Image (cartoon, coloured by chain):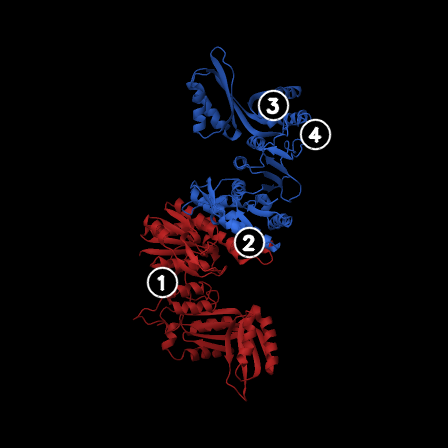
Chain colours: A red, B blue
Amino acid sequence: MGLVIQKFGGTSVATAEHIRAAAAVVAASQARGQQPVVVVSAMGAETDRLAGLAKDVAGAPSRRELDMLLSSGEQISVALMAMALRDAGCEARSFLGSQVRILTDSVFSKAHIREVETSRLNAYIASGGIPVVAGFQGVDAEGEITTFGRGGSDTTAVALAAALNADECQILTDVDGIYTTDPRVVPEARRLSRITFEEIIELASQGSRVLQIRAVKFAGKYNIPLRVLHMSGVGEGTLISFEESGVEAPVVSGIAFTRDEAEITIVGVRNQPGSAAAILKPISDARIQVDMIVMNAPRDGCVDFSFSVDRADYAQAMELARQAAAKLDAEDVLGNAAVAKLSVVGVGMRAHAGIASHVFETLAAEAINVRMVSTSEIKISVLVADKDIDAAVRSLHRAFELDQPSGRWSD
Amino acid sequence: MGLVIQKFGGTSVATAEHIRAAAAVVAASQARGQQPVVVVSAMGAETDRLAGLAKDVAGAPSRRELDMLLSSGEQISVALMAMALRDAGCEARSFLGSQVRILTDSVFSKAHIREVETSRLNAYIASGGIPVVAGFQGVDAEGEITTFGRGGSDTTAVALAAALNADECQILTDVDGIYTTDPRVVPEARRLSRITFEEIIELASQGSRVLQIRAVKFAGKYNIPLRVLHMSGVGEGTLISFEESGVEAPVVSGIAFTRDEAEITIVGVRNQPGSAAAILKPISDARIQVDMIVMNAPRDGCVDFSFSVDRADYAQAMELARQAAAKLDAEDVLGNAAVAKLSVVGVGMRAHAGIASHVFETLAAEAINVRMVSTSEIKISVLVADKDIDAAVRSLHRAFELDQPSGRWSD
């Protein structure tokens, strides 16, 4: 294998000892004949420390100055990582986003990459060196420092992989791969050796926290194999790639879940054009993200309109829903902040009928009430009561035989 | 008054509160009609924290990577200071050395400034803004970050003052000016309202720690008035400038002293060409700085050769002196690590005879033995026993009436 991007997140470089260990992993890759290009995040709690300082000096810090401030975190990490690699006998050098250079638009704190220049990196690689690139940061056309938002180091890694035509982009982190579900809830949860981009995007958007969705989408777009593996470098981790032709995809790959949901139902809304918009527009104007949306078939010209939001937004969303309901002359507004969501994900669902009914049968057998449902081509999400979520995940993990490498639903 | 550089050192920006207070000082200057350009150092202990991390990851960190690492400290400070100024209602923006840009040579960790580009700063000033410039750092022709060594923020301030043609360069710090001597030893020590560049350079090189010599020399070269004042902005501080014609300079301005000295004497060296070099060359080859050097007039073709070194270098210097003495067939080597040095400084000495004898009379009256003497045009330094240094400084401070604004020796 040739060129490999190795990205170490904040927990993987949290202390001097972690940095030395990460450098050893990189040096070992080089010794195996690979050409590593390293990307690092800020050390552990550094970004939070800096954000705290900003809060202490100014009520509403400017985004430009926040980017100037926060980008120093990665600057510290790249310098230390380059030192550690040199100490381990490697030729290594740190590069800031502005030095690479990673050219972005000028949207401070959530900039998008326009272009990654590769001449300096390629020259350094050709001379036998290991570049250590600061994650999370770029530079705009005026030379202003920009950042990509939280988790932006994954974006840097994938963008470099695309620009340098890397063979693989490795995300080294504190877990050893992607699991069928959270092992804290289901001890029999199994590490997946492979998963598709579509599945990981669904899993990530449904609560799995290992990767940033934006970086995964970017990797998918450029067809860059992503591998999540443990920061110790031990194990194969999970390879994220496109479905290979000839290999039948598993029906169900994993179950993601989140506990911090809330549901709101407006009862007896007259079913006429504009009703849904009248309810949802004020919510989105308040920058509240609506997740599931369900509307039943009309009865007597009226519908019940339900949606789910993040629990933190519940009180505000309820208030807005009450105002909308009053304007629409609806019957009532019901709310429940003690709900959780789980999602069964798998690209093989496309070709298999009966997944949804198996989900409902399984939950019914456990006497778990389903409050809301939404489906996509490769996912079924259900909203259940908070207290039922662990039992629901466990029963579905068992029902789809996710604890068995070659169960009935796995190929 | 027009454009003023205001430089805040590490203690002046040590916490979020300090930064807010410093921003208030800058905002007040602007309100008085001045155009401030701010220079800041890294927050308090930040540079030491980063240097400690470097030590933890690598035995001998590369200087390039150290500069990459340490320059992040000032990056944090400029962002926070710009935020605080904006919060105080000012238009302000942070600038890194690479953004200004402050072009340097490529000698990492002790780079010299080649050029300060002023177009971006001038454009921003013209738009009504207060630039906040990172001290201590620049960029070389290849875009590599360089630093100027400890205290390098003073250098940045003076270089900006020269490039922007500032009316004054203010160094805001934790003392309210330059004193006739250390007030901890002499409570009657007086703040000087004015002092010359030559005097401050002698005082600084003799142990006064307020300013970096390099920055003062630079300011003198470009004839930029420097003012040391308290970080609260209260008071006039001390103005450092050239002697004004027509104003007679004080004979004695101040007394500096250092406690960490050691003396070495090689007794009975044959007085022939090359003897002095044979003694001093091995010392300087070991990178030990020799301060005072004294050789008495020869007697019987032999001399006693004495010199002083920093106490930390004493053991090594003694060993090297013994080796040299053996080669030169000298009689003996004597050493004393319990000595201290004081220097009486004043540009008016040039025109006044009798200063040296007044120094010796004063010390003799206190029964203080002088162990070594060296003089320059505006300075008399003497080496005394450690235990005598406080009494020596106090008696000379009194003898030269430094506690009285218009004493006999003050004009």
The amino acid on which the numbered mark 1 sits, given as a three-letter code, is Pro
Q: For mark 3, does the 10 Å Cα neighbourhood hold few (<14), some (14 to 19), or many (20 or more) residues?
A: few
Q: Mark 1 to mark 2: distance in Å?
A: 49 Å
The amino acid on which the numbered mark 4 sits, given as a three-letter code, is Gln
Q: For mark 4, does the 10 Å Cα neighbourhood hold few (<14), some (14 to 19), or many (20 or more) residues?
A: some
Q: Chain of mark 1?
A: A
Q: Mark 4 to mark 1: distance in Å?
A: 79 Å
Who's the residue at 48% across and 41% down the image? Answer: B148
Q: Please tell me whether mark 4 or mark 1 is closer to you in this view.
A: 4
Q: Which residue is mark 4?
A: B404
Q: Mark 2 to mark 4: distance in Å?
A: 47 Å
Q: Please tell me whether mark 1 or mark 3 is closer to you in this view.
A: 3
Per the image, label 3 sits on a secondary structure element best described as: helix
Q: Are marks 4 and 1 in contact (CB under 8 Å)?
A: no
Q: Chain of mark 4?
A: B
Circle number at residue B351? 3
Q: Are marks 2 and 3 in contact (CB under 8 Å)?
A: no
Q: Which residue is mark 1?
A: A225
The x, y position of residue B299, in whole percent, is: 50, 11
Per the image, label 4 sits on a secondary structure element best described as: loop
